[in-house]
Amino acid sequence: MCNPSKRNNINIAYIGGGSKNWARMLMCDLALQEDLSGTVRLYDIDQKAAELNRELGNKLARDPGAKSDWKYEVAGSLAEALAGADFVVISILPGTFEEMRSDVHAPERYGIYQSVGDTVGPAGLMRALRTIPMYHEFARQIRDHAPDAWVTSYTNPMSLCVRT
């Protein structure tokens, strides 16, 4: 990324690109970057959510206040999203909100109270058991399709995901 000409042709693969929070914050941040532009390929198992974010991202890119030129696309597969990516952002929600609720509250029956249910303790372990197999597949696909990419993870349990 030290090559100034590359700063105007960055390829970002966003795994979990249908995110209602993290993806939208990233799009806003990218729109305000004066010296970066490129393409963000959104990949999500919920393709409709990724489509909504594509529409939002392209709308933000056209906003008069945007200081950069980003194009948002929906990738139909993980391999398509990763092909030639310079950066990979992973922001997924493994499991359902009901499973997360159970992760936090089931240990309470045994006197284990957790301040955070997605990073440590029994709840973090349960979430890790759902997430690590996915991250193993992401790592394999990144190795195969974007071996030089920088990877950023916004998924908890953070340390176990990154270690995987």
Image (spheres, rainbow, N blue to C red):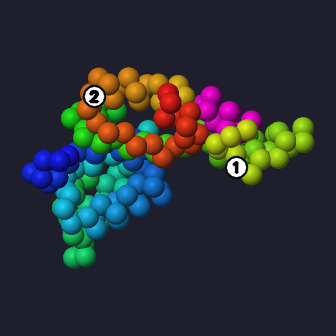
Q: How many marks?
A: 2
Q: Is residue 48 visible?
A: no
Q: Is residue 154 magenta?
A: no
Say whether residue 149 is visible: yes
**Residue 115 image point, x, y percent:** 74, 51
First reached walking from the N terminus: tag 1 or tag 2: 1
As rendered, which of 35 and 62 lies closer to the eye? 35
Prevailing secondary structure of the magenta residues: helix
Look at the numbered disc 2 and give the secondary structure of its residue: loop
- In the displayed structure, does residue 41 sit left or right of residue 3? right
Magenta residues, start to end: 122-130
Residue found 27% across the figure and 28% down from its top: 147
Label annotation for residue 116: 1
Residue 73 lies left or right of residue 102; in this view the side is left
Q: CA distance from mark 1 to mark 2?
A: 33 Å
Q: From what the image shows, is residue 59 above or below residue 71? A: below
Give neighbour class at mark 1: few <14, some 14-19, many 20+ (Cα, 10 Å). few
Residue that appears at 35% across and 51% down: 51
Query: In the current view of this chain or complex, which residue is farthest to the bottom?
Result: 64
Task: Write down the residue under mark 2.
Answer: 147
Amino acid residing under circle 1: Val
- The percent position of residue 6, horizontal first and vertical second, equals 13, 48
